[in-house]
Amino acid sequence: MIEVEEMTIEQVRDLLDRGELTSKALVMFYLERIAKYDKGERGLNAILELNPEALQMADQLDEERKQCGSRSILHGIPILIKDNISTKDHMHTSGGSLALADLYVPFDAFIIKKLRASGAILLGKTNMGELMSFMSYTMPDGYSSRGGQVNNPYNRSLTPSGSSSGSAVAVAANLAMAAIGTETNGSLTMPARYNQLVTIKPTVGLVSRQGIMPISYYQDTPGPMARNVADATILLEAIVGRDEQDELTDRSMGRIPKSYREELGKDINGKRIGYNPKTFEELDSEEKRVMQEAMEILEKAGAHLIPTLLEEIGDYGFKPNLYEFKAGFNRYLKSVKGATKIETLQDLIAFNETHPDTCLKYGQDILYEAQATTGNLSDPYYMMLRQNSLQQVRTIGMDRHFAKDHLDAFMTMAISSLAPVSGYPSLALPAGWKREGEPMSLLLIGKAFTESILIRIGYQYEKRAQKRKAPILG
């Protein structure tokens, strides 16, 4: 078997096309690594469930490649899926919750249909922060009652971070070519940071949320997690598009380029990238060093670094999310009625209360708060909260500073709520390490539907910086 660790999707595709590798052998390679590194007492615990049809799918796609050629660059490429994304197959969709451990969803999420059409192999479901980490204030990142604790592959004392932790850890440890995660507020970008990955958090409305367990109507989005910008771009390109069942995707019409991959390798001469000098001064010495290095790399690549006063404006997203979670989660459960005994958020809370030893290790205080809201998105108080968050973060924050300083993107090393709460895109990239072994990440934030610009900038930075290191697995 050819060693495919750290290979790009394009490199593996070329091996498949030349007949030097088969998708079945590729799936076997990952299954062996999962058995060796993910399972057991000292395992990473990133994979919640494997697809029993993965090898059969690989066989069929190998034969199709021989007879008809490949459907796309993802033909026969094994991809992992976060456990809050519905798949109509022999895998559960539980959101990491024991209360939903019986749920076989009778339909594919929109993005799953697109991945299947591209020829991607759904290798399995990843462990995650239970219910998208929207259950308890004290629950550690990457813990679920169904799957247990996800472990960081670089250092078990480090957090795997964010609710997409299983997807991130699995890709970082080369347990699949790439993965799909989801984000409401940092659940793509934070795990990318702590697992030395690239992720693209799309503009809300670029990628359908249909069939995905929700938190927030205005903030939720799925996105790709990969080891390099090119792979993340390939996966993004496969899942974008308008969906009649997600009305926010109407915003993407006419705003999706013919190809995001065409941005790879394009120059960034004259691109204006903002940074906040005040925030820079608040970084510790190691973060300043890495930020300064990133700025120098981008300037040498032709970009202009522009001081700007854009900064965090507080957590305006959380309170409205309580209303949206209750409304959206009940709607999702209604869509799968009959496939699980849990029909409402109240049912799930009650199930947890009757199984405290296994389900309530860290409590469910956030669920209680969400259940206590009206869950009515026409509630005047909710509407005021959401409008205030959009006004403060999007209009007064992002839009004003991007326009005033003529910015193409904004860069920071902070874990930022600007992109999630505004619904705007971001791209996270490996940027270096602190002396004690903690990874650092560069975060690029853009205006709505400017993923192409972020990809172009990110690719030029990655090519010059080369900061990713694969974990050493014992």
Image (cartoon, grey):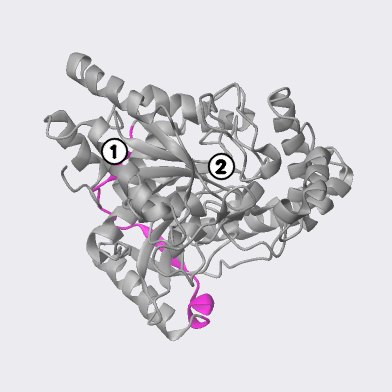
Identify the image quadrant of the C terminus.
Answer: bottom left
Query: Is residue 115 in view from this perspective?
Result: yes
> Is 290 drawn above or below residue 318 in the view shown?
below
Q: Residues within 10 Å of mark 2 (few under 14, many from 20)?
A: many
What residue is rendered at 25% in x and 17% in y?
64
Start-end of magenta stretch: 259-282
**Which of the two residues, 288 or 158, is positioned nearer the viewer here?**
158
Amino acid type, callout 1: Met
Q: In this picture, is 73 found above or below 278? A: above
Left or right side of 59 for 165: right
Mark 1 Cα shell of 10 Å, populated few (<14), some (14-19), many (≥20): some
> In the image as oriented, which residue stretches furthest toward the bottom?
285
**Secondary-structure class at tag 1:** helix
Instruction: Give how far apart the Cα atoms at labels 1 and 2 are.
Output: 31 Å
Residue 317 at x, y percent in the picture:
70, 55
Which quadrant of the figure contains the N terminus?
top left
Residue annotated with mark 2: 221
Is residue 262 found inside the magenta-colored segment of the image?
yes
What residue do we see at 29% from left, 28% from top? 75
| Residue 78 % position (x, y) | 34, 36
Indicate yes or no whether the magenta region holds residue 101.
no
Q: Secondary structure at mark 2?
A: strand
Which residue position holds label 1? 28
